[in-house]
Amino acid sequence: MAGLCNIDEAVRLLQSGQVVGLPTETVYGLGANALDTKAVAKVFEAKNRPSFDPLIVHIADLDGVRSIAELTPEAESLLLAFSPGPLTVVLKKKSIVPDLVTSGHPTVAVRIPAHPMMLQVLQQSGLFIAAPSANPFGYTSPTTAQHVLAQLGERIGGVLDGGACKVGLESTIVDFTGESPKVLRLGGMDVALLELVLGELPVQTSSSTPHAPGMLSAHYNPGAKIVLHDNVRDALRAAIIINDAAVLLFGPVDKADYEHQYSLSVSTSYTEAAQNLFAMLRELGAKYPEIHAVRLPEEGLGRAINDRLVRAAATR
Ligand code: TXA
Ligand code: MG
């Protein structure tokens, strides 16, 4: 069973080809040296992840991005505006990137993460780090080091504890390899902000997108059945009938009618709801057989949170 490690140990493990749980501002990643095919293979193995699902490469700075990918002017302007941060761009890859990282595609997903400890690992190691979210394939993404240890502790070299993730949702992915940029995954960076730089951005997160199976419709399984509702009244009605189901809502809670109610954010903050989402799904999934969740308004990070809820609801 692996334990927590410090930055020096994490760097040493990565340099010797091991996989390590690493904190980022979005969710914890399961990292390995992106240029070492054997190390990358261990990531797929530890996660039980199908090899047709490509990984994101984490990089310290723009020069690093240029050394493994063809940076277009539009992608560069987006990275200059929003990196380090919860943003991933898909670019044409250079030949230095192993096929296993990109699942054989001529493109590579790259991101400059904002977590100071992760940035230090990148700088100190001098590595490019391929890292998917540090959960077994199909399960809820981890937002604490303890989540990583609980699910993958037996299969990895260690976990660097960087505290609870500040964003809580995976990065927003923008593809720059087509005719014009498009969003492949809604995430921690609000698309409206990206549009300030790029103009209108189409969102194409269809679960059928063949080269992005991480967008599979069934994902984020927290171990309970999840049912989505349009309003609190409907969620309560459904949960009360079962009498042993949790209601997960956004905004203030009135427990007079039913005790098992939980709020992603009492003050209706999308930022707080995003921070809480995966940890609450995990907690409630362990405690209740069913979670009746209320959709958030389709605006800002609410869109990305709804996206995760829909996928979690599709798992059973
Ligand atoms: O916030 C995040 O992005 C986190 C942290 C650890 O950085 N990582 C993460 O990785 O969410 P993962 O593997 O769970 O999701 C990566 C997504 C997948 O949906 C994958 O299909 C997509 O990125 N992806 C990777 N390379 C791609 C490529 N070349 N073209 C299109 N999609 C790609
Ligand atoms: Mg993932």
Image (cartoon, rainbow, N blue to C red):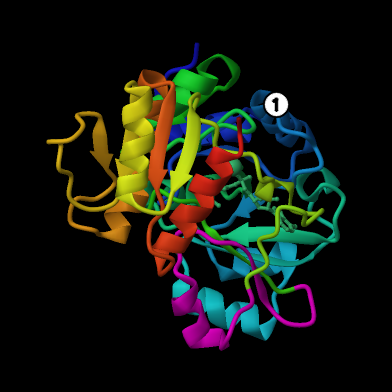
Which residue appears at 43% of the width and 34% of the height? 8
Q: Which residues are magenta?
A: 177-202
Pinpoint residue 52: horizontal percent, then vertical percent.
81, 42
Vertical comparison of 286 with 202: above or below: above
**255 left or right, relative to 58:** left
Pinpoint residue 231: horizontal percent, then vertical percent.
35, 53
Pinpoint residue 163: horizontal percent, then vertical percent.
31, 38
| Residue farthest toward the top in the current orientation of the protein | 1
Regarding mark 1 in the picture, which secondary structure is present there? loop
Residue to which mark 1 is pinned: 48
Quarter residue 43 falls in: top right
Badge count: 1
Which residue appears at 32% of the width and 59% of the height? 270
Which residue appears at 31% of the width and 58% of the height? 271
**193 left or right, relative to 202:** left
Pinpoint residue 13: horizontal percent, then vertical percent.
56, 29
Vertical comparison of 146 with 121: above or below: above
Nearer to us in this view, 23 or 171: 171
Whether residue 171 appears in magenta in the rendering, the answer is no
Q: Is mark 1 within 8 Å of ligand 2?
A: no
Which residue appears at 38% of the width and 24% of the height? 242
